[in-house]
Image: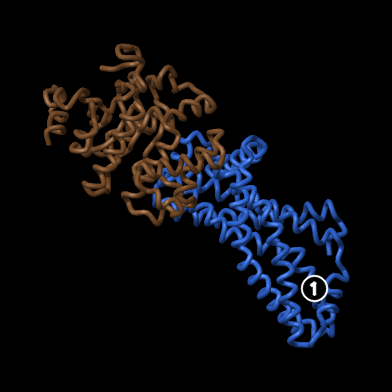
Chain colours: A blue, B brown
Amino acid sequence: MSNVFETAGEVSVFGFQAVTDLFRRPFEGEQIRRQLAEIGSKSLPLVIASGFALGAVLTLHTRSTLVTFGATAWIPTVQALAFFLEIGPLVTGLLVAGRVGSGIGAVLSNMRATEQIDAIESLSIDSFKFLVVPRIVACTIALPILTLFLDFAGLLGGFASEYAATRTSFQLYVTQSFSSFEWSNFYAPTLKTAVFGFIIGTVSSFLGYTTNEGAAGVGRAATRSVVASSLLIILIDVILIKFIFFIFPESAL
Amino acid sequence: MIGPNDTNGGIPAIAFDHVSKAFGAKQVLRDVSFGVRAGEALCILGRSGTGKSVTLKLIVSLIKPDQGKIWIGHDEITHLNETQLSRVRRKMGFLFQDAALFDSLTLYENLALPLARLTDKSPREIDFVVDRVLGEVGLAGDKRKMPSELSGGMRKRAGLARALVLEPRILLADEPSSGLDRITASEIDELLLRQKAEHKAALIVVTHDVRGARHVADRIVVLDKGNLLAQGTFAEIAHSESEIARNLVTE
């Protein structure tokens, strides 16, 4: 148990150092751009496809239930609230933890094992600032944007499913989707994914950057990055939801 | 023996002064002292796991010694902070055992990175330097390739090119011939010697290849289980008191 607290402390210090290093020259703009492309753009197909499929499936399920109560007109509203409040942020966080978290853990641990990090240091370049800070920043920026893509892909999937069943118009579907919507339903849950991104970037970078197990550690770092990031996202989500309800009481359903 | 206080022939480029290093219970280096002058090539010979690579990492200060002092020119580096170390490291080029090229960057970017970060050169000047250094190691036509597209010998030459790009006064090479055929290994040795001759660089080569060491070294240091068994020219080592050292150079 003391090991868990020790590691949690080390990860916290690691994340704090990344935040302070972010405001120290050089600002690593080019590295951040590269990582945004790697983490953000390359995750888009997975996020959009998952959102679309989830939206379609969720609509199929809710329709069969709401039909019983004659409340099928509520499908777009339920769909939008479900996606923007919880499904979008959480699923995006877990998807990115799987795709990006494992990648960061594997890349950095491989760089450690193959002496690339030593090579960077020997060139008088701060390896932490060069490798870790851009990855954490990119994850923090990319998550809210990816979440929006998943949210809207989910709505589109829901519409496709509804259109197949009732030939409803797109305009009507969108209008109904946002009929009971508060602004805080939109930006608070979306922005909380920046915290998810920070967690994925920090935990995965920590596990990859600090590994010292040679080539055998690469796979382990990748797996640990996914497991630890996913668990932390789920736990932090609960805390953040309570926090959002406290700050924006109107966002509670 | 060349030491930190030996000014006979100028201040040594590198000097180890009674350096010891342990990782946990394993003592990797014990009270090791030696030095290298500018324009001199020193080979550190020994079997695997005798502390050869650790010696190089101590010189670049990637790890710190438990005891003793390490001098790079006039600087005693064991107590320097990162900013001061950065200034000292700029004098050095390091060829890693497996080249340690950055996987995600092209060959050109691997060489341009230190130039862009550590010098005031314009992009055009960087292009010129990268082209020149890649030409020197015979990789002029490969600068757009990724490291994964290069053969073992090409990777070594690319690693050497990156080590040379800042025109270092100290060149460190960790097992430059490992995993290479004899012809390619000789090419790498020639490149190292050319750098030593043209830039009067101090060269330290870690190797277990005695034949290569004979070709490159002005002097050698023999390490075994962290102990410095002997140092001197090949002729001197062949008559040293240490049987292990004698056997090693006469194998």
Quadrant housing residue B25: top left
Q: Residue at x 37, y 39 (%)?
A: B95
Residue A217 in the image, given as x and y percentages of width and height: 43, 50
Q: Residues within 10 Å of mark 1 (few under 14, many from 20)?
A: some
Residue in the picture at 40% in, 34% down: B93
Can I make out residue B31 in this image?
Answer: no
Identify residue for label 1: A78
Looking at the image, residue A149 sits to the left or right of residue B221; the answer is: right
Q: Nearer the viewer, residue A185 or B44?
A: B44
Q: Residue A63: x and y, percent? A: 76, 82
Q: In the rendered structure, the residue with mark 1 lies on which chain? A: A
Residue A125 position in % (x across, y down): 52, 36
What residue appears at the point 71 percent right and 80 percent down from the top-left corner?
Answer: A61
Residue type, label 1: Val
Image position of B19 (left or right of A186): left
Label 1 sits on a secondary structure element that is helix
Question: Quick one: quadrant of the C terminus of chain B?
Answer: top left
Quarter of the image with the N terminus of chain B in it: top left
On screen, residue B61 versus residue B38, left or right, reads right
Residue B44: where, in percent of width, then height? 26, 31
- The residue lying toward the viewer, choosing from B168 and B48, is B168
Answer with the quarter of the image where residue B96 lies. Answer: top left
Would residue B95 be found to the left or right of residue A181 on screen?
A: left
Out of A227 and A110, give the one closest to the viewer. Answer: A110
